[in-house]
Image: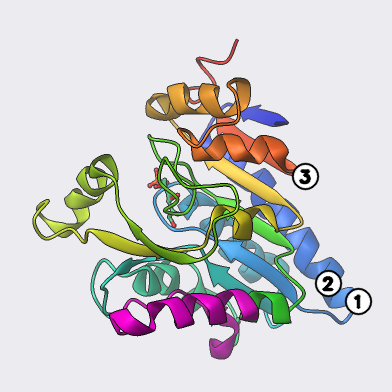
Amino acid sequence: IPTHIYADAKDASRAVAREIADLIREKQGAGKPCVLGLATGSSPKTVYAELIRIHREEGLSFRNVVTFNLDEYYPMEPDSLQSYVRFMKEQLFDHVDIPEGNYNIPDGTVRVDKVADFCRAYEARIESYGGLDFQLLGIGGNGHIGFNEPGSLINSHTRLMMLDHSTRAAASMDFGSLARTPRKAITMGVASILAAKRVVLLAWGERKAPVIRGAVEGTVTEHNPASYLQTHPNALFVIDEAAASELT
Ligand code: F6R
């Protein structure tokens, strides 16, 4: 997987935001929507901050941007403190001119017997726009992309996933305790991610170094779902020096 290593997350995020801004403008020029797959968590925050700066200082418009988030906890109310709806509004959507109907986030309030229908409709909606032009990813310490935990298959689609203990432990900081942390999430599948025309994965810090090494240099394996990106023709890892420290 092509890997670009930067001194720090800020430098790296500037480069990624620039690529996204260029893509939005290119699609604008062609009179087309720009379809972005987005991630939450700490890694993309600096990319979103830079996109907001480009919107304010360079007049980049998001009117033609359509977004699909990777995942949402289940169950989850959109106005909860920990919801990814709230996260995306706070980190990006409330600060740019994206039309309200243009962003899509898996619905954490769907009745359990309707989840499968919801997941099919989510994928169909992505396809109705001609698929994702660009997918932004973080990576879990266990190699998860979206909430495709180890064991997820390369042909998996959007579905309800049981979260790994390590994922819940990391999230428990936000929820106050492990007991209050959801056990499940709705996530786009590995196949949904691999169908994007371009995939850029972000990783910052030493904590991610072992899993980055596995994903980039190891075999393609369900034990490290990010390794599936080795099969994508146009994927890029954008990482800082600490996350690169175990690459040979
Ligand atoms: C979030 C998501 C997750 C995170 C991953 C890394 O939408 O899909 O895969 O990207 O857990 O999280 P951070 O960036 O907080 O280390």
Q: Which mark is residue 30?
A: 1
Q: Is residue 190 left or right of residue 146?
A: right
Name the residue located 57 percent from the left edge and 65 percent from the top edge: 52
Mark 2 element type: helix
Q: Which mark is residue 234?
A: 3
Q: Are marks 1 and 3 in contact (CB under 8 Å)?
A: no
Locate residue 228: give its quadrant.
top right
The quarter of the image holding the N terminus is top right
- Under tag 3, what secondary structure? loop
Q: Residue at x 44, y 76 (%)?
A: 116
Classify mark 3: residues with Cα within 10 Å, few (<14), some (14-19) or many (20+).
some
Task: Say which mark, if any, is on residue 27.
Answer: 2
In the rendered image, the residue lying farthest to the top is 248
Tell me, yes or no, if residue 109 can be seen here.
no
The magenta region covers 100-124
Q: Which one is in front in this view, the residue at disc 3 or the one at disc 2?
A: 3
Q: Is label 2 in contact with label 1 (beta carbons under 8 Å)?
A: yes
Q: CA distance from mark 2 to mark 1?
A: 5 Å
